[in-house]
Each structure stands twice: as C-alpha cells, then as structure tokens.
Image (cartoon, rainbow, N blue to C red):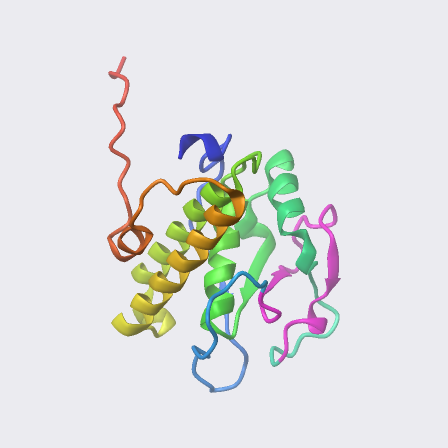
Amino acid sequence: MESVFDAWAWCASDQLEWRSPATSRPLDKSTMIDAQNPGDLVFVFKEGADSTFLPRELASFHAKGYGLEEEWALAPYAIDDATDLLYERRVRPGDVFWLAAPSLRALVWGLHDWAHFHNHGPFDEPALTELACDLVALEWLRINRELVGVDDADLKRVAHELAALSRFRFEAEGKRAPTDDLDGLFAAPYPEDTSPRPPAS
C-alpha cells in the first residue's frame, strides 16, 4: 500500500487524548459502523494550540455532555483539509486536538481520521487509503481494549463491519481489493511490513 500515502508516518502518532462525556454512562456500542460520518465525533482544539489555520466551529454544537462552552473544534467537513494543512505546516496533531467520542462508532472513525492526520497522501486511491486507516484504527482499538472497555465480541463485530465497509468502497470505486478475503484480513493481527530493506550503510 506504499502508493496511497506520500508521507508515511510523517509525524509519529505517540498519543491521542480521548474523552468520553462527563456522565457515568458506559461507551455506547449500539450503532453499526458504516460509511456515514458520526455526528458525535468531534476533534476539539486544545487550549493555546496552533490551530487558527484550520476550519472551525464551536465544539458545543457537536459534542454534548462535555461542559464545553466557548471551545472550538475542527469543522466536521474539514478532515481532509486538516490532513493537508497539518502536513503542510508540520503541526503535530497531538498538540492540536483531543477527541470527543461517546460511542464505539465515533471512536473507530476518530481513530481512522487520526491515522489520516499522520499519514499524508494524494487520495488517488480512496478505497485503499481508507483500508489502511481502518486497519490502523482497529489495531489501536485492540491494543487499548481494556482502557476503552471492549471485549472479544466487540472487536469481532468491529472487524466484520469494517471489512464490509471496505468491500463496499472497492466495489463503488470499481477496483479489486488487495485480498479476496477482507473479513480474514480484518480478523487477523495487524499486517507486518515484510518488504525487503536496503542494507545498512
């Protein structure tokens, strides 16, 4: 998938601050992960962050239950804009945003977008680009399963729904997926890079 990003990991994704609402309710796992952008997914600007170059809306319009008032957030339509602008200015995403996501669906999409922010690309192959970001999001979810509060059944469902979504994207684009078994790809551990490395000099 080297062709889908022109700047693989231009910035190390070391930490994402994720917050759920200030209530004691558990993570909402009731909604299927589909192609619709979750309305409860919000990248809120950190106080004092270098963010004036990014499209913005009041965070309170979208993030409910967080006690937000005058705080700003990335405009929901501006994920692609942010991917380009963060890369152009070399502004580390972790210095700019924290993620408001009260549902599993919103969290998965937030992690997907987080992968975009750290891996800039031309988006000439949308289905393949989205597949790469989905795999990263799922691996982060697996690694942090106890912190997030998901179990084997949740992870299995997320993998199955992401595979179905990926299949839909390739069909819509009229291209063949890199494997005929997308369910197997998502169910398996994160794929390791086995491409040959140049000898050390």
Asked if the magenta segment contains residue 120, the reply would be: no
Image height of 201 relative to 159, above or below:
above
Using the image as rendered, state which of residue 10 and residue 186 is in the foreground. Answer: 186
Image height of 157 relative to 170, above or below:
below
Instruction: Identify the residue at horizontal 70%, vertical 58% (top origin).
Output: 75
- Name the side, left or right, on which 15 lies relative to 76: left
Residue 176 position by quadrant: top left
- The percent position of residue 73, horizontal first and vertical second, equals 68, 61
Instruction: Identify the residue at horizontal 50%, vertical 52% (top origin).
Output: 114
- Name the side, left or right, on which 68 lies relative to 103: right
**The N terminus: image quadrant:** top left
- Give the residues drawn in magenta, as a range: 38-64
**The C terminus: image quadrant:** top left
Using the image as rendered, state which of residue 50 and residue 132 is in the foreground. Answer: 132
Asked if the magenta segment contains residue 40, the reply would be: yes
- The percent position of residue 6, horizontal first and vertical second, equals 51, 30
| Residue 178 visible within the image | yes
Instruction: Identify the residue at horizontal 24%, vertical 16% (top origin).
Output: 199
- Name the side, left or right, on which 198 lies relative to 67: left
Residue 22 position by quadrant: bottom right
Using the image as rendered, state which of residue 106 and residue 63 is in the foreground. Answer: 106
| Residue 151 visible within the image | no
